[in-house]
Image (spheres, rainbow, N blue to C red):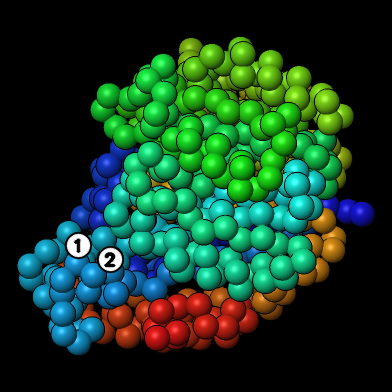
Amino acid sequence: MKSYEVNFDGLVGPTHNYGGLSYGNVASQSNSQQSSNPKEAALQGLAKMKALMDMGFQQGVLAPQERPDVAALRRLGFAGSDAQVIQQAAKEAMPLLVASCSASSMWVANAATVSPSADTADGRVHFTAANLNCKYHRSIEHPTTSRVLGAMFADQQHFAHHAALPAVAQFGDEGAANHTRFCRAYGEAGVEFFVFGRSAFDTRYPAPQKYPARQTLEASQAVARLHGLREEGVVYAQQNPSVIDQGVFHNDVIAVGNGEVLFYHEDAFLETDRMLAELSSKLAKVGGKFQSVCVPRSAVTVDDAVRSYLFNSQLLSRPDGSMLLIVPEECRGNERVWQYLQGLTGAGGVIGEVKVFDLKQSMQNGGGPACLRLRVALNETELAAVNPGVIMTAPLYDSLTQWVERHYRDRMTENDLADPQLLLECRAALDELTQILKLGAVYPFQIN
């Protein structure tokens, strides 16, 4: 039976703005308060999805959240009609309104952790929605995320869904941004790689001093238990605290893996040699041959990596066994990074080609190509069981492009977020989107 890695890209929401909400994310903070372009952001993301589909890769789409989140504002004490809630929040607590309008759900690498059926005890694909409790504006995402994933992967014979972990610091979980999987083939048993920033209970592990470590060891272990993973099929590694303090807020800002290959920066991890040896040994036991590609700090500094998002790239397997690296335009704009990539592809190694995409709108808010997609390994039977409305096709691309053109503004500032009309626009757009994607009722305004 054939198996595939399907990339489900997050569709950028109508309220895409630069709120500067993510402490520890250099791009998010440095572009705070600038005017954004939601229409351009959504069209850039759709263009990437269409391009990968045209290259022959399996591609899906994951819907955005309802924003502003009026229910969240009500829980914080704002009252009255929806319009009054928004106006009161704008007057009394603008940062809370900005947080309730965040379109950060576009970075669906944080939506959930996914384990393919070949790895799990019950032979189903398992999803655990990320609690994202380190940042308020993201912590309000998981209820809708769970409903959307449930509507996409609804067949309980093939798919199992778990609620987000307890929303406390000890179980901070950021989803697939700190998780990858190594395997010989997507449909075969593999080794799941969990990267954490700190331990909540074990003081032997160091922690960053400046920025928060968003993923805990305990959260990663809990997800592995929920998914029924075998001990011999899991490797835990700690992210280097010093790179977190340099703006590497998720592992996917400093490393990316696919198939049998890990592409990483020299300073990405603690105890790197031990971790590489464990990955190699465990992958060998399921028939794989682990390969690592280390980018030396002498060629690319951590600062270069953070500014260019070199590692927040998509590493994709081609039918001939070679790999394609999808990088943002910022990589070409960084002389050292681009020089390294030219040498990498010219060396005849496993990464044979680099393709560049313009994702400026999402990049300025701190997320690149890898942030925009959730990877789900599926065999033919499982892929056939996925809601077909969310699988990218040429007609769906056309429909979504026209939908964006109809509903999205081409400029968004903080003042625009205080406009009650924006909520009505967003709900009208999302109501239509659920029909296009055949999701049913997944948003609070559709359910309540």
The reply to whether callout 2 and callout 1 are in contact (CB within 8 Å) is yes
- Give the side of residue 271 with respect to residue 393, left or right: left
Q: Residue at x 15, y 74 (%)?
A: 78
Q: Quadrant of residue 71?
A: bottom left
Type of amino acid under label 2: Ser
For the C terminus, give its image quadrant. Answer: bottom left
Q: Along the line of sight, which residue is nearer the eye, 293 or 1?
A: 1
Q: Secondary structure at mark 2?
A: helix
Q: Nearer the viewer, residue 168 or 7?
A: 168
Residue 86: image x %, image y %?
Answer: 19, 76
Above or below residue 200? Residue 172 is below
| Residue assigned mark 1 | 96
Q: Nearer the viewer, residue 10 or 43?
A: 10
**Three-letter amino acid code of the residue under disc 1:** Leu
Q: Residue furthest right?
A: 1
On the picture, is 188 further left or further right than 120? Answer: right
Q: Which residue is mark 2?
A: 100
Instruction: Classify 155 as above or below 317.
Output: below
Left or right: 408 in relation to 8: left
